[in-house]
Image (tube, rainbow, N blue to C red):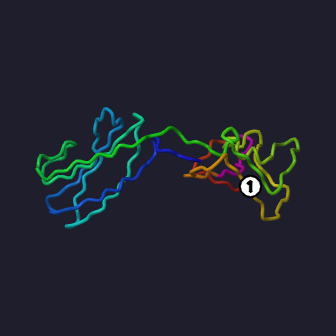
Amino acid sequence: MARNLAPGKAVRIDVTYWAFSPSQDYLDLFYAADANNPNWTYLATFQPSGIGQQLLTTTYQLPSGGSLQAVRAVFRYQGTVSSCGGGSPWDDIDDLIFAVGGPLVNVALASNGGIASASSTTPPDGTGTFFPSVAIDGDRKGLNTSFWRDATADTYPDWLQVDFAGSKTINEIDVYTLQDNYTNPAEPTAGMTFNLY
């Protein structure tokens, strides 16, 4: 799947800055859900561990908001936390504006040009559909016992291949197996386990 930055996603911020006075320098971070009309929300304050180049890394969850969001770093000498700086002539404010896209795009879907093939396939037997194409139909639960199943039980290797419609950037690959309670499947989660199949 190709994933854009989207509301609800955890993102990482890396800030490199130069510190002069570890006891009096501070880096304040803020974010705005709408860069066109920013209402800065305080994220964190960091104090350098020494003099010289410093690297700060933190994460936060992208809020719902505009299609352009922003992160602000306020480097201040003394003063108090403020998205506008602490009032010192040595303060520095930098903003990063970035696009926030929509939800996941499943580039493997047949409707997006994906074509699935496999080493072998069990023919339909009245209990389900086992063609490779059902592996990319967007059904994560395996409803109606629809999933790819090879025709060579307990003989390996087996493979499933998806050809995309052109070059794609892939950020995530999700693979789901038959759920233990396949007659009443639940929406899969990262913590879901299986024991029977």
Q: Is residue 73 left or right of residue 103?
A: left
- Name the foreground residue: 148 vs 163: 163
Q: Magenta segment, which residues?
A: 175-184
Q: Main secondary structure of the magenta part?
A: loop
Q: Residue at x 33, y 33 (%)?
A: 36
Q: Residue at x 25, y 65 (%)?
A: 53
Q: Is residue 86 left or right of residue 129?
A: left
Residue visible at 17% across and 45% down? 85
Circle 1 Cα neighbour tier, 10 Å, few/some/many (<14 / 14–19 / ≥20): some
Q: Can residue 128 be found in the magenta stretch? A: no
**Residue most extreme to the front:** 166
Question: For the C terminus, which image quadrant?
Answer: bottom right
Left or right: where 86 falls relative to 68: left
From the top left corner, tell me how far across and down residue 177 is, in percent.
70, 51
Task: Count the marks.
Answer: 1
Q: Nearer the viewer, residue 40 or 94?
A: 94
Q: Which residue is mark 1?
A: 160
Q: What amino acid is found at the position of numbered circle 1 in the picture? A: Leu
Find residue 99 and report its horizontal and vertical position in percent: 42, 41
Q: Position of residue 112 (x, y in %)?
A: 66, 40
